[in-house]
Amino acid sequence: MSDHLEQSFVKQLKENQNIIHKICRLYTNGDDAHNDLFQEITIQLWKAFPKFRGDSKFSTWAYRVALNTAITLYRKNTRTVSTVTYEGQKHFLSQEDYNFEEEEQIKLMYQAVQQLNDIEKALVFLYLEDKDYTEISETLGISEVNARVKMNRIKGKLKKILNP
Amino acid sequence: MDELDLLKKAWKKDTHSFEQVTETDIYKMLHRKSSSIVKWILVISILEFAVWAAVSILFNTDDAIKSLHAESFSFYLKILTYVNYAVVVYFIYAFYQNYAKISTITSTKQLMQDILRARKTVQYYVWYNLIMILISTILGFVMAFIYNPKMSALKDKIAHEDSYITLSKTICVIVITCLLTVGVFWLFYRLLYGILLRKLQGNYKELKKIDL
C-alpha cells in the first residue's frame, strides 16, 4: 500500500484515537489489555482502510471496525470482575441529596457498564456516542425496534446493578 | 436524570483522559501482526487442508493392493481417488470464498455469521475426511479378508468352529478401531474450536436473542 495512504491513515487515526480508547476502556481491564486491543483495532482499521471511501466521516466508519474487532475478532477473553463496593453503592443512592462527588458516581457508572456483556456494551457505547437507533441497528445487524427494546432493558439492568 | 445520561455528559468531556498515541506509535502498530480470531482460523484451516492432503498422499494404496493381488479393486479405488480430489478442490475453493467474504465493515451479526460459515466449511471437510477414512478402513478389512493369505486361518475358524464368536470378535475389533479413530478426532476438534470460538458463539447467541 502506498505511503500516501499510510500517511493519511495515520493522521486520521491519531485525530480520532479517542474513539478507540473509549472502546478499549469498555472492553478491557488494565493497561496491557487496553494497549493490546488498541493495537488489534488499529491493524484491523488499516486492513479495511482501502475500502474507506471518504463518503462518511472517518469516525463513523471506524466505529464499526473497532466494535467488530472488540466483540468478534479479539481473541482474549477480558471479562471484567465486579469491583463495586457496598459503600460505593450507598454513596450512589444518595444522589437526590446532591451531596456526592460527581466523579465518584461516574466511576461507579463505568464499573456498572463493565459488568454488561459484549453486545450490551456495544449498544451502550453507540448510545453514549449519540448515535440514533437506525445507526445502532445497522452497526450491530439487528432491527431498530429490537435495538430500542434492548437499550431500555440495559438501562434497567444498569439501574439494578447500581441500586440492588 | 437517567444514570446513563449522566455518564453521557461525562463521556463527552472525557476525551483528554487517555494517554495519546503518537504518529510514530501508530506506524509501528501497522507493521505488527494481527492476532485476530480470523487469522487463527485461517492458519488452522490451512493446516487441516495440508494435513489431510498429506495423509492421502502418504497412504498410497496402490502398493498394498499389488501385494495383495487385489487388482480387481484398484479400478474402483482409482475412481474413488479422483472423486476425492475433486471434492477436496471444491472444499478449498469454498473455504477461500468464505474467507474472502469476511470483512470488518459489515454489521457485527453478519461478520459473526461469515466467520461461523467459514468455520463450518472446514468442519464439513474434516467430517468428509473422517468418513472417507472409515470407508477406506472398512474396505481395507474387506480386501484383507478376501485376498490376504494370512487371513485364511481366521476364515477357517469362522467357517468351522465357533463361527459366531470369532465373527463377532472380528467385527468388534473393527468397530472399536473405527470408533476410537473418529472419537479422538472429534475430541481434538471440540477442544481446539471450543477454545477459539467460545466467545464468538456466546456473543452471536446474545445478538440472536435480541433479535427474536
Image: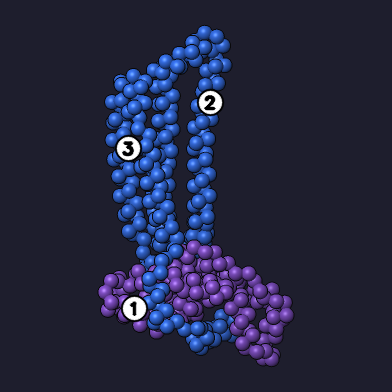
The residue that appears at 60% across and 69% down in the rendered structure is A80
- Asked which secondary structure carries label 1, the reply is helix
Q: In the image shown, does B68 or A123 lie closer to the viewer?
A: B68
Can residue A120 be spotted in the picture?
Answer: yes
Q: Residues within 10 Å of mark 1 (few under 14, many from 20)?
A: many
Q: Which residue is mark 2?
A: B173
* Cα–Cα span, label 2 and label 3: 27 Å
- Asked which secondary structure carries label 3, the reply is helix
* Cα–Cα span, label 3 and label 1: 46 Å
Identified by mark 1, the residue type is Phe
| Residue B86 sits above or below residue B118 on the image | above
Q: Residues within 10 Å of mark 3 (few under 14, many from 20)?
A: some
* Cα–Cα span, label 2 and label 1: 63 Å
| Residue A66 sits above or below residue B173 on the image | below
Q: Which residue is mark 3?
A: B84
Q: Position of residue B208 (x, y in %)?
A: 48, 60
Q: Are marks 2 and 3 on the same chain?
A: yes
Identified by mark 3, the residue type is Asn
Q: Determine the chain carrying the residue at label 2.
A: B
The blue one among the chains is: B
The residue that appears at 28% across and 31% down in the rendered structure is B79
Q: Are marks 3 and 1 on the same chain?
A: no
Q: In the image shown, does A39 or B76 lie closer to the viewer?
A: A39
Q: How is the image coloured?
A: by chain
The purple one among the chains is: A
Q: Position of residue B122 (x, y in %)?
A: 40, 48
Q: Position of residue B136 (x, y in %)?
A: 40, 30
